[in-house]
Image: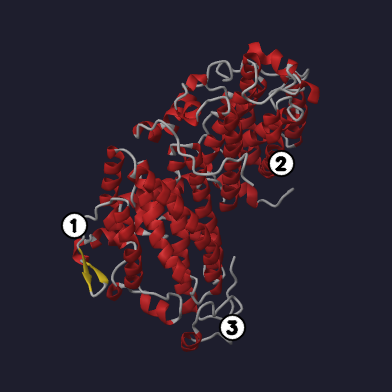
Amino acid sequence: MIIHYKRPDVMNVEEVTERAEPRAFSPQDDMPEEYRKAATRMIQFHANSEIMGAYLERPFIRQSPSLDRKLAFSAKVQDEIGHGQLLYRAAESLGIKTREEMLDELAAGDGKFLNCFHYPMTEWWETPMIAFFVDGAAMRRQATIKRTSWEPYAHAMDKICFEEGFHIKHGEDIMRELATGTRRERQLLQSAFEEWWPRILQFFGPTDDQSTHHDFADRVGLKTMSNDELRQAFLNAYLPKAEKYGLEIPDEPRIREEEGRYVVEEDDLDWEEFWEIASNEYAGSHEQIDSRAAAQDAVAWARKALDRPHGS
Amino acid sequence: MTANQLPGPDELTERERKTVEALVFGLADDEFVLAERYTEWQVRAPTLESDLALSNIAQDELGHARLWYDLLEEFGYTESELLFERDPAEFTHAAFVELPFEEGDWADAVLRGYLYDTAEQLRLGALEDASYPRITDRIGKITEEESYHREHAQNWLERLCDDPEGRENVQAATDRLFPHALALFEPVDPDREAAIQELGLRSEPLADLREQWCAITVPFLDSLGVRAPVSEDGTLPELPDDHGRSSAHTGHWPALHEELTRTYRELDRTDTPTITSDPDHAQ
């Protein structure tokens, strides 16, 4: 339970803006509510995404085609849960919500998470789409969060980025295996890529002028790079990698090169679906959220037993 | 003990090799199938902390399975033959480890862990002086990890049994699992069981290990207010017909095997990639 009390020496937003720099603020600072809420929203989204990403990948522990892959997949899913744990702790340190409240919101369908984790993933050859491309995209964003102004968030990112590096290597290894496999394996990989590519481009969210929360988060140093800059960095690194593995980049969404920059034709992307997903209203959202909620509900009795004072 | 030491994998006689196999297949298959079931709890355990703990345990068991399968690979088997292309009816694990978890039945998960790891401690203890060094090489690492698993399971059982609903769930799991757990002490190949001791592989007969196991588990459960289905005079419940080992498996096993070989079959794989170093050489 969080105790709210009035603090006379709370920093105002102007002061925060002035002092904002990497890892500038910690629980010792009296941050204004606006900052604490914005940071909570950002970190909770991140934590939820770790949990829902793990949920999406867990069936592939079983479906792994070798013992080593099974071990690696199990360890990856475990790491993501560990990241969720760290991030909820970083979010809790802002004093707005408890972990329990955030997990309850996730189960109730009120917690937001990354667009890519709302889509079903059923086949092994789809796994590099998450484990290589989406994780690679996430890595771009996470690396910049090492410089966020909320120190506990930046601190969590040190460990998370370290582990994500291994995940991406694992994802790339699965992709290499498929890309150098039989003709059929290459075809399956290509079709998975075509299906996931637009979603991956939307990973970074809407272009800057549509982003509602960016301005404030940018001013107070929570965010250090815009969505568009992040997507540039991702495309610079990952378009060549996709080509290296023999993947053909789909004609749509159109991507032009202008003065050394990639310009994605935004109108070629399905933003209606993106916003449907962002409000947890997509068909896949219900499926992922509800089945996870049902699993959580089924073990509520064990949590209750755990909460009981020991020896009573 | 060194006087009766068996030679390396290539120098064993046919009888010696078959006897080692009869022992090791059971160890490997138990660990593998139990781990496979454990992973079902990933992203589904009661709390994030218990999720992480059970994931660790599942990976430990997978690691142990790998250690034992590697030993079988020294006899010329491939991982594909051992896991992905073996007829599910040929697997030698106790059906105890293949039983599915009912949704939310965390009592089953921790009780199964407790019963299994207690059995594991005893059977590994009886292999500590095994005459085949490739077996003894592996015991230390596995025993250490299993003792952490047992502690984890015991702590959970104590917490659950402090709560009336929790204790009821543990009792229900005990009624269901206990008779199946006895199969952990059934031989993989009854014809080779005598040779396992004659060749100095296992120091004690399975029946003695089972007795020791009961002497630990029954009083522990009793201390939690949970009754194992053992009569006053110590008579054990009958083994279920489909208890695995050299007998039939339950219908849950072919279904599980079908799922876990799905990608392998759909991609027409004929071998399995190795992506980590050989644990025998890794430091």
Indicate the position of residue A243 as horizontal and vertical percent values: 29, 55
Indicate the position of residue B54 as horizontal and vertical percent values: 59, 44
Residue at numbered disc 3: A7
Query: Which residue is pictured at 37% across the width and 47% down the height?
Result: A176
Relative to A66, is A216 above or below?
A: below
Same chain, marks 1 and 3?
yes
Q: Residue furthest top?
A: B191
Question: Could you tell me how many numbered marks the image carries?
Answer: 3
Residue at numbered disc 2: B144
Quadrant housing residue B6: top right
Horizontal side of residue B202 vs A174, given as left or right: right
SS for callout 3:
loop
Instruction: Tell me if mark 2 has few (under 14), some (14-19) or many (20+) residues whose alpha carbon lies within 10 angstroms of its own.
Output: few
- Which one is in front, B60 or B79? B79
Indicate the position of residue A146 as horizontal and vertical percent values: 50, 71
Q: Type of residue at label 1?
A: Asp
Q: CA distance from mark 1 to mark 3?
A: 56 Å
Query: Which residue is pictured at 49% across the width and 78% down the height?
Result: A33
Q: Nearer the viewer, mark 1 or mark 3?
A: 1
Instruction: Tell me if mark 3 has few (under 14), some (14-19) or many (20+) residues whose alpha carbon lies within 10 angstroms of its own.
Output: few
Residue at numbered disc 1: A251
Horizontal side of residue B78 vs A213, given as left or right: right
Q: Mark 2 — on which chain does it sit?
A: B
SS for callout 2:
helix
